[in-house]
Amino acid sequence: MANNSTIKIKQIGSPIRRPKDQRKILVGLGLDKMHKVVERQDTPEVRGAIAKIPHLVTVVED
């Protein structure tokens, strides 16, 4: 992975009736509304957060 590679993440699921830790992961990624897209550095930490909530987010391809 390059140093300046980024990844776009889109929220596709609602945090309502989800465990508190999953809601915290969404906030940590900068997601707070349905269908919002954020761009983050492509790091193992971000990939791990995405892996914990695959039912709430998706990776957007350009």
Image (cartoon, helix red, strand yellow):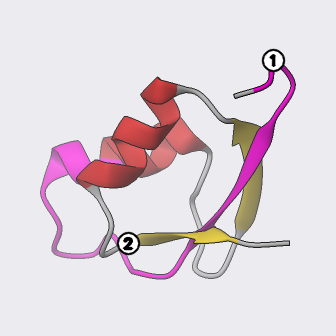
| Marker disc for residue 56 | 2
In the displayed structure, 43 sits above or below 57; it is above
Residue drawn at 57 percent across, 60 percent down: 32
Q: Give the Cα separation between the discs numbered 1 and 2.
A: 27 Å
Left or right, residue 55 beside residue 3: left
In terms of image quadrants, where is residue 33?
A: bottom right
Furthest-top residue in view?
Answer: 3
Q: Is residue 26 magenta?
A: no
Q: What residue type is labelled 2?
A: Leu
Q: Choose the circle earlier in sequence order: 1 or 2.
A: 1
Give the percent coordinates (x, y) of residue 30.
62, 45
Number of other residues with Cα within 10 Å of mark 2, as a class: few under 14, some 14 to 19, many 20 or more: some
In the displayed structure, 50 sits above or below 37; it is above
Location of the C terminus (image quadrant) = bottom right
| Marker disc for residue 25 | none
Q: Nearer the viewer, residue 6 or 38?
A: 6
| Marker disc for residue 3 | 1
Residue drawn at 25 percent across, 50 percent down: 52
Number of other residues with Cα within 10 Å of mark 1, as a class: few under 14, some 14 to 19, many 20 or more: few
In the displayed structure, 18 sits above or below 4; it is below
Report the mark closest to the observer, 1 or 2: 1
- Residue numbers of the magenta segment: 2-23
Q: What residue type is labelled 1?
A: Asn
